[in-house]
Amino acid sequence: MSVTFINCTPHAVNISCEDGSVLTVEPSGDFARVATNVENVNIPGIEGIKVVKTTFDTSKVEGLPAPEEGVIYIVSLITLNALKGIRSDLVAPGNLIRDEGGNIVGCDGLTVA
């Protein structure tokens, strides 16, 4: 069975495949986001710098379609990790590939949570 990738990030994802080819998955127009809760914290010794604890509200997910048979959704690593154990149909870009100028040009595969 082959799968269909749906890119829920705002940019094209260029995936370097094992055979040397590159699979480009264009953005779908849906941008998956998980709501965050931010709480100020105090760490002794850190003064004059705001420090926060960020947690994710997985009951508030936007832009992520419902699971569909044979479909894998490409999301950000933050979204992937926030929904770990909740959705098994999510992947994120793997290790980033950069050009000589340091610009991201693709990834060396996909990662799961």
Image (spheres, rainbow, N blue to C red):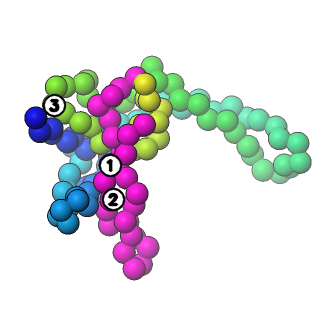
Q: Residue at the spot x=32%, y=66% of the render?
A: 105
For residue 42: magenta?
no
Question: Relative to 58, is 90 above or below?
Answer: below
Which mark is on residue 63? Answer: none
Q: Residue at the spot x=33%, y=59% of the render?
A: 107
- The kind of residue on which mark 3 rests is Gly
For residue 101: magenta?
yes
Which of 5/38 is in front?
5
Q: Residue beneath label 2, please? A: 107
Q: Residue at the spot x=69%, y=39% of the render?
A: 52
Which of 5/9 is in front?
5
Q: Residue beneath label 3, please? A: 70
Extreme residue in the bottom direction: 100
Which mark is on residue 110? Answer: 1
Which of 20/63 is in front?
20
| Range of magenta residues | 86-113
Residue 44 place in picture, x, y as percent = 88, 42
- The kind of residue on which mark 2 rests is Cys
Q: The N terminus lies in which quarter of the figure?
A: top left
Tag 3 or tag 2, which sits nearer the N-term? 3
Residue 95 place in picture, x, y as percent = 40, 57
Distance from the alpha carbon under mark 3 to that under mark 1: 16 Å
Which structural element holds mark 2? strand
- The kind of residue on which mark 1 rests is Leu
Indicate the quadrant where residue 21 lies: bottom left
The answer to whether residue 60 of the structure is visible from this angle is no
